[in-house]
Image: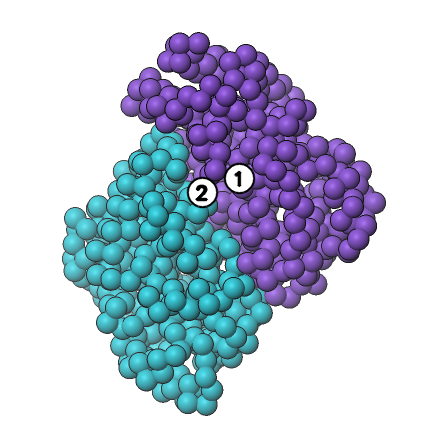
Chain colours: A purple, B cyan
């Protein structure tokens, strides 16, 4: 029996989208492919309301995180670390041979704008990295307030991982001034994994061109030059995943972005209310994610047992991440999931836990 | 109308394999995924008759080329360049900040073992890069003879791109002593693009661990450590493409590797005989690819017109690569294509060209 996925990625993918992958193969040097890719890029720009460049890579979101570091950081980068994925930025920067400093706060807490400002006052950084929606803790970063700080330091670029929020939580990329905003498609896009998407500002692209050892596969400039030439990609892309992405962008635009954001918020509110009634919320108050809820396991239930019982009924949620494995559990409400599906899940949890 | 692909990747993918992608999504941190990935790794090892490590990356083959450079080259690398894809090794090495020297021969010619030996005598290199099957020219490298040279220089690792030959042309990886042997799945594996596969020797893995700025996404050590731990991948893999890869490995093993290699050779011989009768072969004699034939366009036909006519009949071949666009054309006979399908294609070409 298929278990419907309420985990923070991969999320549940609808049958018509899964089927879209099964269309016959086309060459990636064909006019058909150029039309496919151009359509995808334009639909993503429209959905995100951005004038920045859009690139689709065949990789997970982590690949673009590495690309963003290589393309935008000469030497010094400041990483905001409050969970597993924000710590990944720091590890990637080190693995790319960069000088990485970290602002580290306890898991479950948010990075505040003043913490970033304090560091930027002391030292010139090429870029600041941030995770908008920390899937490991359910913490949502205060983008608007941080943007105000970033605007005071125009030589410091802003690289934001919106892996588990983009297309589900409204992010005004251009207004905020995010230089590289990246996401994986298996989260709020509700697609099978294997593609990652980013937006890139003109100034980020210009800097990219001045860094000669920026690597090859995740080279923003090469991707955009090829797109400019013939709407293709320098290396072979995952064509069947692009069929699915194209169809899903049509469905996302048909739903309407405001409706999509509203649906995510409604699901989040429902799960949060339930969590507050029977457990507690793990994130610092006021910084709760809109796309997943990290529940503080105050009743000390055995999460593995709950998930095992849910599995028999066709549902799957997620245990806590890493050290939080039993201390928390996570319910994702992202992608194409509906409030009715969330209610059905919660009813089943209540039934199993006799709440 | 779908055009059956006789291009050097993506190659034709069978319907049951396309459909295999459409199975419902599973989490990549589940036992189901671990079983899927372990099965794939073991089947690839069996098919390739290798005791080396096997890694599957979510990327094109180019991604692993970059990974091989970052994981195995401290500083100096020798690149054998005789076409577009072997030149890509050189470009990647430069883009990764390495000192890359090239042995360059005219497109259509093979790199000879003595050319490599001459360079290795003069300077100590961390690695030599080679393309086994140059898709741009249809030239096949003499792996056995080159292996004899490589064995004399044990500190120099051997990185071989078998992107368009692995699983179609027999390559005795362990016997030859190839340190990193990499391929994309949209060629002789006959799968949709988006995954790339490599084998890695123990000594290559050991060197990887000594290079601290080897990057993150294509880190061989991290991939293998995670595999060792729980048969999973550090970053989210393309799960639906892995469904297809798993099913296709079953089909490949059911055909039998010797049968598969024999079928490729039969198709190659048929196309070569036809090409020699009406045109000429582009590659240097004795170095013709087994998986695609690059035809010297001695009759000066307009390749675009031929392909357009073939398209109306449901077939697609490939023009020449880059500067060879009209000077050559390419017919791929790789993956799951059969001799009967090749004969049908050739009959149609004969009919269109009135040969």
Residue drawn at point x = 80 percent, y = 38 percent = A148
**In the rendered image of this protein, does residue A116 appear above or below residue B216?**
above
User: Are there few (<14), some (14-19), or many (20+) residues within 10 Å of tag 2?
Assistant: many
Q: Is residue A209 left or right of residue B263?
A: right
- Quarter holding the C terminus of chain A? top left
The label on residue A288 is: none
Label 2 belongs to which residue? B236
Secondary element under disc 1, as helix, strand or loop, is strand
| Residue nearest the observer in this picture, B251 or A87 | A87
Q: Is residue B109 left or right of residue A182?
A: left
- Between tags 1 and 2, which lies in front? 2
Query: Residue A138 in the image: x percent, y percent?
Result: 57, 30
**Residue found at the very far right of the displayed protein:** A152
Query: Residue B283 in the image: x percent, y percent?
Result: 36, 74
Secondary element under disc 2, as helix, strand or loop, is loop
Residue drawn at point x = 49 percent, y = 45 percent = A60
Tell me where residue B350 sits by quadrant: bottom left
Q: Is residue B20 left or right of residue A73?
A: left
Q: Are marks 1 and 2 in contact (CB under 8 Å)?
A: yes
Q: What chain does badge 2 belong to?
A: B
- Quarter holding the N terminus of chain A? top left
| Residue nearest the observer in this picture, B206 or A61 | B206
Query: Residue A202 in the image: x percent, y percent?
Result: 73, 50
Residue drawn at point x = 37 percent, y = 21 percent = A306
Label 1 belongs to which residue? A184
Query: Residue B346 in the image: x percent, y percent?
Result: 28, 57
Q: CA distance from mark 1 to mark 2?
A: 9 Å
Q: What chain does badge 1 belong to?
A: A
Both on one chain, marks 1 and 2?
no
Q: Is residue B47 left or right of residue A117?
A: left
**In the rendered image of this protein, does residue A30 appear above or below residue A113?**
below
């Amino acid at each position: 029996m298929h278990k419907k996925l309420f985990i923070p990625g991969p999320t549940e993918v609808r049958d018509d989208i899964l089927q879209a992958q099964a269309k016959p193969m086309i060459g990636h040097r064909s006019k058909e492919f150029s039309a496919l890719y151009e359509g995808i890029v334009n639909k993503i720009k429209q959905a995100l309301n951005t004038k920045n460049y859009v690139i689709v890579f065949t990789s997970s979101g982590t690949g673009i995180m590495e690309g963003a570091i290589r393309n935008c950081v000469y030497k010094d980068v400041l990483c905001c670390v409050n969970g597993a994925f924000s710590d990944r930025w720091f590890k990637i920067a080190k693995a790319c041979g960069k000088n990485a400093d970290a602002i580290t706060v306890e898991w479950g807490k948010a990075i505040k704008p003043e913490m970033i400002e304090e560091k930027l006052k002391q030292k010139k950084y090429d870029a600041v990295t941030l995770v908008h929606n920390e899937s490991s803790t359910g913490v949502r970063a205060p983008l608007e307030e941080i943007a105000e700080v970033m605007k005071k330091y125009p030589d410091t670029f802003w690289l934001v991982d919106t892996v588990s929020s983009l297309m589900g939580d409204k992010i005004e990329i251009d207004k905020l001034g995010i230089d590289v905003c990246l996401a994986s498609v298996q989260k709020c896009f509700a697609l099978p994994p294997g593609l990652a998407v980013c937006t890139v500002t003109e100034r980020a692209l210009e800097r990219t061109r001045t860094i000669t050892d920026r690597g090859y596969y995740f080279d923003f400039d090469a991707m955009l030059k090829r797109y400019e030439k013939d709407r293709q990609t320098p290396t072979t892309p995952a064509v069947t995943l692009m069929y699915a992405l194209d169809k899903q962008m049509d469905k996302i635009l048909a739903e309407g972005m405001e409706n999509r954001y509203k649906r995510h918020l409604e699901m989040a509110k429902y799960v949060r209310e339930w969590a507050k009634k029977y457990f507690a919320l793990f994130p610092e108050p006021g910084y709760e994610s809109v796309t997943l809820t990290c529940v503080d396991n105050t009743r000390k239930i055995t999460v593995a047992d709950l998930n095992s019982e849910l599995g028999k009924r066709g549902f799957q949620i997620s245990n806590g991440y890493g050290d939080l494995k039993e201390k928390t559990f996570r319910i994702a409400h992202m992608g194409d999931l509906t409030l009715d599906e969330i209610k059905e899940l919660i009813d089943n949890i209540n039934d199993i836990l006799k709440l």
